[in-house]
Image (cartoon, rainbow, N blue to C red):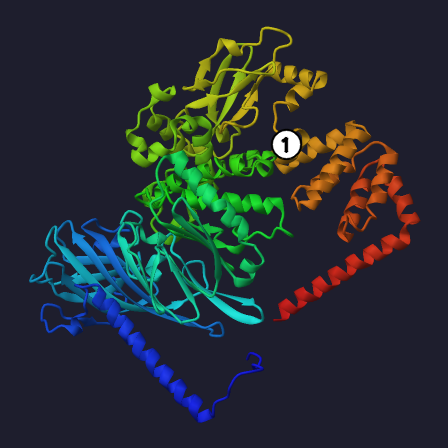
Amino acid sequence: MGNKSGSGFYLSKSTVAFFTLLFAALFIAFTVFAVLYLRSRTGFCNFAEEEESDKVKPLNCTVVPTPGRQGIWDHYRLPTSLVPINYQLVLWPRFHPESPESTFTGDVNITFQCKNATDVILLHSEQIEVTVVELVRFEIGTEAPQILEVWRSSLYSYLVINLNETLTENSIYVLRISFSGVIGNSTGGFMKMDYEEDGRNLSVITTQMEPTYARTVFPCFDEPSFKATFDIHLIYLPNYVALSNMPAIIIWKVTTFNTTLKMSTYIVACVICEFSHIEMIEHGNEIRIWARKSAIENGEADYALNITGAILRHVMDYLNVSYPLTKTELVAVPEFPASGMENWGLIIFHEDSLLFNYSSDTKEKRRLICSVITHEIGHQWFGNLVTMNWWNQLWLKEGLSSYIENTFPPKLETEMFMKYNDIPDTVRLFHSDTYPFSHPLVVEEENLKTTNEINEAFDSVTYHKVQYVFKLYFLSEFRVSRYLTMTLSRQNSQNEVKLPASVKTIMDKWTMQTGYPIITLNTSTGTLSQEPFDCYTKMNCGDRHIFNTWYVPIEWIKNGSAQPLTWLKSKEGTFPEMKITSENDWILLNANITGYYRVQYDALNWNRIINQLIKDPEVFLSLFISGILFLSHLLPLFIREVILSYGIESGSFQEWEIIWNIFLKQKDNKSDYSDELLFALSFSKEPWILNRYLQLSLNSSIFESHSVRQILMWVAENKIGTPLVWDFVQENWEIIKKILNQILQFFSKFLNLLQNMTVM
């Protein structure tokens, strides 16, 4: 209950009761009027109860599963006999921040065309109750078949509507369905997110339809290839704001949205909230950033607004394809289940992926926000405008959006991205792409039948592998915009961009098989050869690989100078220019991991590289991105620790201080690499350096209690450091005892917590 007002006038209880009842009656009357208005606005979509007609007999039904029946509903893909044209969708969520359960009701009129005669209508419907189903024919004066029964096939979440006769080929029909459901707080569908602001408990209603959650909100043809236009109407309480894919036509608090472009069900979206927004106009496109009122007031949406217009403009210029909508709205939702979702015109983000606090957030978070916004805006073309036929081609939208994500942010935020490189991501992808459960970019369609199987396709291989293949091999020349105007399968441009084969031929090698090659160079003969990396390591090979050689672009350096790009097109090839003929010659392939492959050299070249490192390591550092910082980001943990530890052990105080300063910077940036740096610092062979390290460990402004204990253990494991630690502990026992007590208190509280959890 809010505070009483200090001024104003007062009414008697009877007067208040009268006006309350009057308001309630007016609200109910208005709501009924609004629903009737929405139904009448659809013209031919009036409900049968309002007509004196025997052509349509409404079926009031409670749909129940019917096991054991066989038919077209046993296949994971919808038949292509019916194609949706338009959805007239009315949604009415009932929710309250204090309510444990929120519900919604809805009506949908689906206009569809019959491509092939059939007496079964198949739709997706899951976790919603269907109460009314009616069928009418679009053409006036012609009859539609009668509905015999409506039942649910649970295997692939189908609503099955059996008719007494077949639908007429090429004719258009309208299917009217009333339904209801529960608003959840899970990872998809209609969701209610609760949050607190200014001492009030508030809620926001949002949707997440990808990949197959639209069917939990309304009955539909829930496959990406079944595109249609949508007319969306939302009914909601007067203190809320309603958002959807298209600009609104507001009629009090029943909001009708303009008809969408033709699109898939998985990018249908709506948000009902008490948010505020900031806005700007960019090339005639209205851009709005919505968020909690306090976040808007604190300026946390300013960064997103400042860069969104620039990102949109860049993508349009880069692809040479205009943005098809007149507005773009970005919404920051507390606890949204994804970092971002690309719904056309209404992109929904987790708060952490959109809001930036200039006074407290790090540059790393700003870089993340810039990347996520670019990725989701890339989807407005890749996925929304051009859509894959089925989820086994998911790489076409996710991979290409990841490619777009990496083309522009470095230009927009030059300083922030200058020290960042995606080599660590490449190395992680190398690791995951050799797992037994890895998969090709193009998965067999039969392997993605259920929602769980489809969800599993959203993995690092799908998101990241294709961007390396595209970005690093030829699409910088090929231009991604061509994908929007023609299919890759018909594109043959080897003469234009100097490729060794057609785009399809090259891409099939990379998309149709798992893994990546290891390239072996024999510098005595100038021979390059390739084989799958997991076969080279004798891991997970077996029947997994029916080895089909990749087309591999080889970027290489000889004696510090970049050489012309070379293509390895077969299992083995000889390149005379890669022979070592002088005792000073050395060769590096894939120096900055610009290609998606690993490299192995013969002993001769390894020795030449080692000699060059001893003689003049600066030659190599100039080839890489940022010297020692590059090494700290490049390799799997065990290699990184070995390199850093060996460098400290064999180096002087200069090397020790370099790593120490890197640690201080990364600590301020809350980096993940701090522990490896601290571990390496304990390997010094100089007693005075180790003593200095131990003294620094007591600086409470740098280290927390647990770090002190760790440093003591690491230095004690060093033979030179063992006696130093013993003397240090004796000299500083009172301080160390307090630190140990703090650690013991922490563990005591932790054990008590575990015990309480066990009792519960």
Which residue is drawn at the image coordinates 47% and 32% (left, top)? 468
- Tell me: 136 left or right of 574: left
> Percent position (x, y) of residue 83?
21, 51
* Residue at the limit of the structure toward the front, as seen here: 8
Which residue is drawn at the image coordinates 32% and 42% (left, top)? 386
- Using the image as rendered, state which of residue 75 and residue 312 is in the foreground: 312
**Residue marked by disc 1:** 630
State the quadrant of the C terminus: bottom right
* Residue at the limit of the structure toward the left, as seen here: 141
- Tell me: 342 left or right of 37: right
Which residue is drawn at the image coordinates 49% and 39% (left, top)? 435
Residue 400 quadrant: top left
- Using the image as rendered, state which of residue 316 and residue 672 is in the foreground: 316
> Percent position (x, y) of residue 643?
69, 31
> Percent position (x, y) of residue 243?
39, 60
- Using the image as rendered, state which of residue 105 and residue 79 is in the foreground: 105
Say whether residue 635 is visible. Answer: no
State the quadrant of the N terminus: bottom right
- Using the image as rendered, state which of residue 339 and residue 451 is in the foreground: 339
Callout 1 secondary element: helix
Q: How many numbered discs, if any?
A: 1
Q: Label 1 amino acid?
A: Phe
Say whether residue 58 is visible. Answer: yes
Which residue is drawn at the image coordinates 22% and 50% (left, top)? 79
> Percent position (x, y) of residue 388?
32, 42
Label 1 Cα neighbours within 10 Å, binned few <14 / some 14-19 / many ≥20: some
The correct choice, above or below, for 592 with respect to 181 in the image is above
